[in-house]
Amino acid sequence: MSKDLKLSGKTLVIVASILFLSINFIVQTLMPGAKLDMTENKLYTLSEGTEQILADMDDPIDVNFYFSEELATPYPTIFRYGKRVKETLESFAALSDGMVRLRTIDPEPFSEVEDKAVAAGIQGIDTGDGQKIYLGLSMEDTTDRETIIPFFPPDRERFLEYDLVKALYSLVNDTLPKVTVISSLPLEFGPGGMFAMQQGQSQPYLMWEQLQQFFDVEKLTDDFDAIPADTDLLMLVHPDELSDQQTYLIDQFVLKSGKAIVFTDPLLETAADVNPQNQFGPKPPADQSNLEALFTAWGIKMDADNVVADLELGQRVRIGDGFRGVKEFPHWMGLRNEQMNPDDVVSGVTNMLTVISAGALSPLDGATTTFTPLVTTGDVSSLISANRVKNTQDPDSLVRDFVSNGEKYTVAARVVGEVSSAFDGAPEGMSDDALSSAGDHLDAGQISVMVVADADMWVDRFWAMSQGQGPDGQRYISPISDNGSFVINAVDHLTGTDGLINLRSRGETRRSFVRVDNIRKQAEMNYLAEEQALQQQIQETTARLTALEGNDPDQLSPEQEAEMERFRSQLIDARRALREVQRNLRRDIDALESRLAFFNIAFVPLILLIVLFVRNRRRRNQL
């Protein structure tokens, strides 16, 4: 890069900096608190749901934000994210009309403040020299109830607003959300169902136990004729064949509350777990559950005849002794992070799901709802007849006959929007209690429903290994996939307010400069060959010069001395040329960065100044 170009770039930045400071002073003086969010994903603009929750607060919340700002300076990822958390909390405080009382605390190493942070449950990251970086918060209401975020992991940046609002909402609402469950699976008994319970050997599903830790959970009996009025979320887990009256109750509840999560299945492979010895007790659930009438009303469908399979994601299953008993099951899939929708607050934090003979979900033509896939298969996927999977005696044939069509299938989806009732009115034969539970007939309503086309994923052995029980009787488990956290996160999300449910994920502040990266790659391609040639020349010249210098100077001939001088000259020229090539490698990048700096520092504030001018001009005209 020439000297003139360098001066020009520096001059631009200096002028832009002066202009920025001047305009910033004017704008902050005349328009305090004014913001113009020009980021692609509106990173610094709070969602309407968040603003509504903040506006509805009746009692103040004290928020202590612990951030080791000075200590985090050498760690760009943590420092940048900490600044963003702080700015978001400041926005919360500004919009809450005094209800969010924010206090930012920098816990200096080995201080009383650090001791208080640790006592509050804030977790630090060890820097390696005995010091710790803190990035967490505690919230406390007027009744001393508290919630804590021990540490803000930067990899959850997309869900920062959701995490903050969820923590705030947990204090604003002091009752556990009520989850009502309709299921033909022995969730409360585990494998063996009621028969195991009668033998004193029942072991509830792990997910059922986890749900009971965080929610007020009630499971309805098979002959239910009402849905509890205090239900916050209705959960269907492979429900048995429902009567028209029961389907109507579900239809009306979802239309009125808008919230449900459904686990259905074209082939339940663990049906025999309910009563494996086929003795007295409830009959095993049906192989298939498909809420066709409700799904049609919601604008979706599940392929009831086939299961999805993926040759790359299929699991190896032991069905006998020794190596020869291990078979590939393409319909038993271990879905990875790449198959999860990264923009959803539930699937976006899921890294691994195990699904067994899952179904394929898809939107219906003309649907009034928005169908958003949350979990899909990979590229090497296909559909296999559910009957064939169920009745096959040769699992290897499923692999031999597998033909991928290159299509990705949706295993779990979010369905949102306006829907009509699946019924024109209450079915005949409904009892007075059932009619009272359903309430006045609703023809349409807004829904936010999650549908998962697999119920086997609830079964412990597919996603967790038990490590025995402790002295307190509590089971210790080692998850091998995220099935449990996926279900808990989904329920946690859907039991929130509409503001929480509608919170979108955000982008990250750490963004690459695409044009800068492209210029760098192109420059490297242009100069790489020349640079390699010069380096090779330097190496060869250095080797020859070293060989000559190793001789006795008194024994060198005039020709050898002249050759040494020529090599030294060539070496100096080659090194100079290499430095020039390396400078050229930065030339286009430096020029672009100067223009970007001018735009970021001067152009954006200039837009704010124009907005201010137009606003004041309109005010004068109105006067």
Image: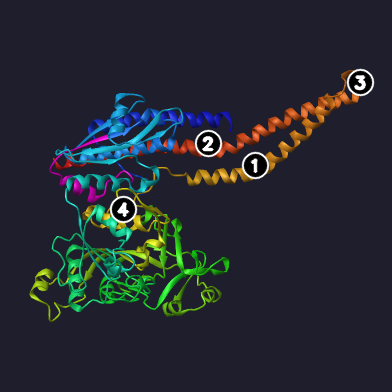
Q: Quick one: 200 or 161, which is closer to the camera?
A: 200
**Which residue carries the number 4 mark?**
504
- Label of residue 590 in the image: 2
Is 310 on the left or on the right of 550, as rendered?
left
Q: Residues under labels 1 and 3: Cα distance?
A: 42 Å
Instruction: Report the label total.
Output: 4
Q: Secondary structure at mark 1?
A: helix
Amino acid at pointer 3: Gln
- Label of residue 527 in the image: 1
Residue 45 forms part of the magenta stretch: yes
Q: Residues under labels 2 and 4: Cα distance?
A: 36 Å
Amino acid at pointer 2: Asp
Q: Quick one: 235 or 534, which is closer to the camera?
A: 235
Residue 287, percent from left and from top: 35, 76
**Magenta-tinted stretch:** 43-64
Q: Residue furthest front?
A: 199
Circles 1, 3 touching at the beta carbon (< 8 Å): no
Residue 185, can we see it?
Answer: no
